[in-house]
Image (cartoon, helix red, strand yellow):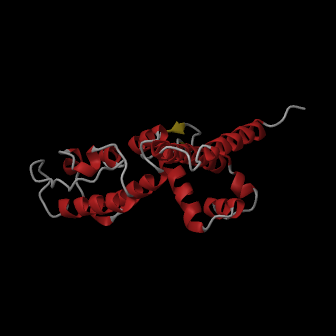
Amino acid sequence: MPSSPVVAVHCHLVQAVDELAAACTPAAAEDELLSVLAVSEGVARRLDQVVVNVVADLVRRGTFAERGYRNAVTAVADLLGWDRAEARRRVSAAEQVCPRTGLDGAVLPARLTATAERFAAGAASLRHVEVITRVLGCPSAQRLSPAVWSGPKPSWRRTPTSTRRRSCWSGATDWSTRSTRTAPSPTTVPRMRSTRCACSASAAGEAAR
């Protein structure tokens, strides 16, 4: 009987990680070690994508409910030994950036389609997805008019590169709060301090969809 594809992939992953660790010797050049950091982050984001997509698939199938779990967060936390905050982050991302199934069985696009594209491309991390979801759900963002969202983009919405989550959250919430205090004219939309953010271009089109 052929072995499970997952078992084979696991062996390849373990071997690849071992080889990466073996490259981190005291004799390694600084540039090599810096490359290890970049490679590790890229791989971590790919694995997060796999986990989020699998969680979304299991939710659509009703697997967690069939196994007696009250909700997906409880299931993921129990099965993987995570605390509820870590489990909720994955489940929330699955709800926002993965395709959905309508009541008639039709496949629907992700709720946050722009964010989903950047998450799939590795340009946005799991934490960026969390920030975008929180920003779009906060009261000040809910009060913004379509004219504000379609106007000139502040820097946190323009730049598709990564930044620290706290900086992204601060810039985005500050922008949404200040925007509610001004007329929704394109000339009055405030321009944010530079926060190089992967969630930048993502949130730009989400509220307007």
Nearest the viewer among 172 and 70 is 172
Q: From the viewer's perspective, tell me whether residue 122 is left or right of residue 153.
A: right
Nearest the viewer among 136 and 3 is 3
The quarter of the rendered structure image containing the C terminus is top left
What residue lies at 76% left-to-right and 58% top-to-bottom?
67
How many dots with numbers?
A: 0
The quarter of the rendered structure image containing the N terminus is top right
Q: From the viewer's perspective, tell me whether residue 208 is left or right of residue 134.
A: left
Q: Residue 173, percent across and down?
A: 29, 62
Residue sticking out furthest to the right = 1
What residue lies at 20% left-to-right and 55% top-to-bottom?
192
Q: From the viewer's perspective, tell me whether residue 7 is left or right of residue 197.
A: right
Q: Residue 196, percent across and down?
A: 30, 50
Nearest the viewer among 147 and 197 is 197
Q: Residue 146, percent across and down?
A: 23, 49
| Location of residue 113 (image quadrant) | top left
Residue sticking out furthest to the front = 27
Residue sticking out furthest to the left = 187
What residue lies at 75% left-to-right and 62% top-to-bottom?
68
Q: From the viewer's perspective, tell me whether residue 97 is left or right of residue 196.
A: right
Q: Residue 19, percent across and down?
A: 65, 41
